[in-house]
Image (cartoon, helix red, strand yellow):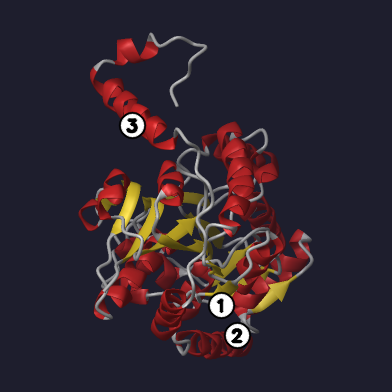
Amino acid sequence: MPAVHQVLATLGYGDAIGNEVLGIQRVLRAAGYESEIFVETADLRLEDLTVDYRELPDASHPDNLLLHHFSLGSRASRLAYALPDRMALIYHNITPPEYFVDIHPTLVQLCYLGRRELGLYAKRCEIGLGDSEYNRQELEALGFPRTGVLPVVPDFSHLSGPANYMQAGLFDNSRVNVMFVGRVIPNKKIDDIIRIFHAYKRYFNPRSQLLLVGSHSGFERYVAMLQDLIDRLGVTDVHFLGHVSNAELTAYYELADVFLCASEHEGFCVPLVESFYMGVPVLAYAATAIPATMDGAGILYTDKNPVHVAALIDQVATNRDLSDRIVASQDAALERLLAKDFDGTLLRFVDDIFRSPRLEHPPVAFDFWEQVRESASLAELRPFRPAAFMALPKDQPAR
């Protein structure tokens, strides 16, 4: 029986892609497939569940299938591209680089190169799978001849354990808690959330607080811009809570009165359905994949006028009947989502690939494997002899 392995740049703890990768592995192993997760890096809490991507050539076989999770181009991606294994691409979307201009120059370059590199996989992959219809359409526009949707059916086990109120308990008071969960990065438009919260606090409810749950590592410049905005507006009770554990996240969801999303670019947005699961009414800006993820539930808004959205928050927070109807609509949407046959859909895609004629492998640069060996040698040199590594001629950069 051929193996079905997964390849991705990094396996993160508690993020949507990481949870999906682990879910896919469980399904594949239950179906009898040998299945490993090959990564460049992994969160220390998940490292023992992964295999270093440099061991992928040893596991390679022309009959195997690689499920390649593409979010940004990586060394793991390029190594997988060159191997003889069959390949399917699972696309989690790449944020347009213009969101990071003047905030994270490196990410501008990575997103630009990632979007350009993505098109090269159209001739390498048996099928391109988006984890939403929005992502599938993007693959189709890039020229992938076969596309499909592998639905995100979130695993809520990380929210099912006991809540940890050690920190969250500070916000367990009589104030209305407006919350957002997600990385503090520009496309999430945290600045718009702050403007909306300022209008809500000023014109509707001074006894309110904004809880921003999510990592901001690497985006300190954006956080500084947000702090400057807070100072200019004179708004108080805005709390950046950073990356939290699953037990802490559960506590924050339990305390939230309203989940507010102003993001302008999402491939799916798992925190929306986490809010459904936790019974938190959702207000979300109708952009990219968000309307499809909401599936008729919650409240979608198209006008970001802060006072307009603040008035919606006030209605949800003060009108119990409205809040109950919103939560009921979210329960129904969640039921429809959970009814999707993720296991069966995944295995049907895998079976279809194995039954189909294999694609001709696109050409690989004649010196590719020589470059891989050289790169590995330099990677070993860097930690043990950094001075020698720095002494490499500037006109011959490490490849």
State the CA–CA distance, disc 3 to disc 1.
53 Å
Where disc 2 sits, the SS reads helix
Left or right: 332, with 48 as reference point? right
Q: Quadrant of residue 383?
A: top left
Question: Can the viewer see residue 21 in this picture?
Answer: yes
**Up/down of 305 relative to 281, above or below:** above
Identity, as a three-letter code, of the amino acid under mark 3 = Arg
Residue drawn at point x = 64 percent, y = 46 percent: 116
Q: Which residue is mark 1?
A: 281
Where disc 1 sits, the SS reads loop
Structural crowding at the residue carrying mark 2, measured as other residues with C-alpha within 10 Å and reported as few (<14), some (14–19) or many (≥20): many
State the CA–CA distance, disc 2 to disc 1.
6 Å
Q: Which residue is mark 2?
A: 326
Question: Mark 2 or mark 1: which comes first in sequence?
Answer: 1
The quarter of the rendered structure image containing the N terminus is bottom left
Q: Which residue is mark 3?
A: 373
**Up/down of 183 relative to 234, above or below:** below
Residue drawn at point x = 57 percent, y = 62 percent: 207
Looking at the image, do the residues carrying marks 2 and 1 touch, with CB atoms under 8 Å apart? Answer: yes
